[in-house]
Image (cartoon, rainbow, N blue to C red):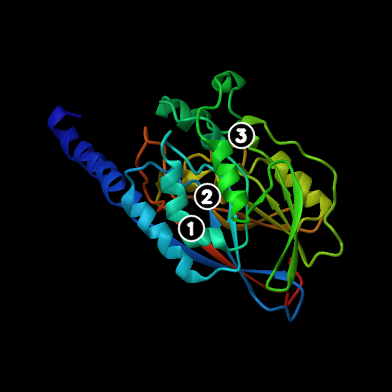
Amino acid sequence: MRPRHLAWPLAGGLGVVAYGAIHEVRAFTLRRVNVPVLAPGSRPLRVLHLSDAHMRPNQRRKQEWLRGLAALEPDLVVNTGDNLSHLDALPSVLDAYGGLLDVPGVFVFGSNDYFSPVFKNPLAYLTGGTGTASKGSWERQPDLPFEPMRRAFTDRGWLDLTNRHDALTVAGVRLDFAGVDDPHLEYDELDDIAPDPSADLSIGVAHAPYLRVLDRWNSLGYPLIMAGHTHGGQLCLPFYGALVTNCDLDRSRAKGLHTHRTDGHEPSWLHVSAGLGTSPFAPVRIACRPEATLLTLTGIDSPRS
């Protein structure tokens, strides 16, 4: 192909990237899904899933959009980590979450709550983004204010699920939680504690949806699992979807509501948030808008298949 014949494909590709970097990365979207996971006849429970804000202080549009989510009046907030993307971003995070911090909530951390982002070869990400982070990548000391953020969240009443179990009663529904620290960093400490049989619903919460975590919680009988980390693939193709998930989860479940099942066990519902942000070194989304999700948990009207 002659050089001049490459002009139109090159211009088209650059146009798509520009659209993703200028428009789509700021096209914040609220997703809504129903999850039939409560006892038949139960009152619906509204759960707002936030993930991967990757906040920087100058991201005013994202902060304003997040503040507006309090108007949804959710019953519960589940935050699956990667809140920060800058050393000075904590005040912006707390201001953006605003009234949501007065709502009952639970949280776990991701790698970008501990470590500020660094430049990575995008080709390496696209060709090898399926396993845990290299241990050598995190030998530096954490430099982001994760402990002040932890205190700020817990002081407002959110439950810290970092390698912990806890329980919470929301709108008369007793919820049992299992949480892990970031599996992408191999910080997760999995155990064999089964769901509390006295709870109305048990939920597993993780930042990164690695199969070892999903398998363990499904085999133990957790009906609902929530995670983030994947950015929904961040760079997606029409009719193909996500190119990678940055973990060992299959591409077809890079975002949204699906099920997860290990042999011999009933399926668990799995919700993976595509998240709200990006690394500052890759500030682009293509066919994958930034999102938060309002999950309406409803009664089980028929058996799951």
Between marks 2 and 1, how big is the CA–CA gap? 7 Å
Q: Tell me, yes or no, whether the two marked residues, 2 and 1, touch with CB atoms within 8 Å.
A: yes
Mark 2, residue position: 51
Label 3 amino acid?
A: His
- Residue located farthest toward the left when viewing the structure as drawn: 4
**Residue placed furthest toward the bottom:** 41
Where does residue 39 sit, x and y in percent of width and height?
77, 74
Q: Vertical placement of 273 versus 245: above or below?
A: below
Camera-side residue: 132 or 1? 132
How dense is the environment of label 1, judged by Cα within 10 Å: few (below 14), some, or many (20 and up)?
many
Q: For mark 1, what is the residue?
A: 292
* Quadrant of the image occupied by residue 12: top left
Nearer-N-terminus badge (1/3)? 3
In percent of width and height, residue 159 lies at: 67, 52
Placement of the C terminus among the 4 image quadrants: bottom right
Q: Which residue is drawn at 74% across and 81% down?
A: 41
Q: What element carries label 3?
A: helix
- Which secondary structure, mark 1? strand
Q: Which residue is drawn at 56% across and 47% down?
A: 152
Residue 138 showing in the rendered view: yes
Asked whether 181 or 262 is in front, the reply is: 181
Please identify, in this view, whether the residue under mark 3 or under mark 2 is nearer the observer: 2
Residue 16: x %, y % from top left: 27, 45
Which residue is pictured at 63% across the width and 44% down the height? 209
Amino acid type, residue under disc 2 in the picture:
Ser
Whether residue 263 is visible to the viewer of this picture, yes or no, is: no
Question: What is the quadrant of the N terminus in the image?
Answer: top left
Q: Mark 3 points at which residue?
A: 184
